[in-house]
Image (cartoon, rainbow, N blue to C red):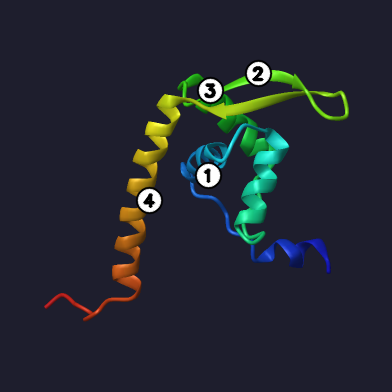
Amino acid sequence: MPKTERYQNRVELLQGTLDLLVLQTLLWGPQHGYGITQAIRMNSGEALEVETGSLYPALHRLEKQKWISSEWQLSGNKQRVKIYKLTAVGKKQLASERSRWEKLLEAMSGVLNPVTPRTPE
């Protein structure tokens, strides 16, 4: 399958959504950057693809806000990798972001699937 077809159905991430996805992924456990991208890709049914050019600025931003922390470790194949983990402050932020996201989903659902459509008079 040509690359353009393969990526045609991928969803572009809204600004701010990437932070939520990264925080959620790190809630499952510490991870390096590539692992974060793979977890997002796999758990989204391969609909979401996080590019390196988006991920690392987001990780730096989240670390600056103290929502995540990082440390260098040696991987199984003896390469240095930076491992990111969620902080206590990050867990609180994740809860807040999830609440806002759920409200947005509810609002969108109300417009897309109204019980009784309303129109202006």
Element under disc 3:
helix
Which amino acid lies under the numbered mark 3 shown in the image of this protein?
Glu
Q: Residue at x 56, y 32 (%)?
A: 58
Which amino acid lies under the numbered mark 2 shown in the image of this protein?
Glu
Give how far apart the Cα atoms at labels 2 and 1 are: 20 Å
Instruction: Pick whichever of labels 4 and 2 is earlier in the sequence.
Output: 2
Give how far apart the Cα atoms at labels 4 and 2 are: 30 Å
In-front residue for pair 91/66: 91
How busy is the neighbourhood of tag 4: few (under 14 within 10 Å), some, or many (20 plus)?
Answer: some
Q: In the image, which disc is placed on residue 101?
A: 4
Which amino acid lies under the numbered mark 4 shown in the image of this protein?
Trp
Report whether 86 appears left or right of 41: left
Instruction: Pick whichever of labels 4 and 1 is earlier in the sequence.
Output: 1
Q: Is residue 12 above or below residue 1?
A: above
Would you name the residue on which mark 3 appears? 63
Q: Residue at x 84, y 30 (%)?
A: 76
Element under disc 1:
helix
How busy is the neighbourhood of tag 3: few (under 14 within 10 Å), some, or many (20 plus)?
Answer: some
Which amino acid lies under the numbered mark 1 shown in the image of this protein?
Leu
Would you name the residue on which mark 2 appears? 71
Report whether 81 appears left or right of 59: right
Give how far apart the Cα atoms at labels 4 and 3 are: 21 Å
Give how far apart the Cα atoms at labels 2 and 3 are: 11 Å
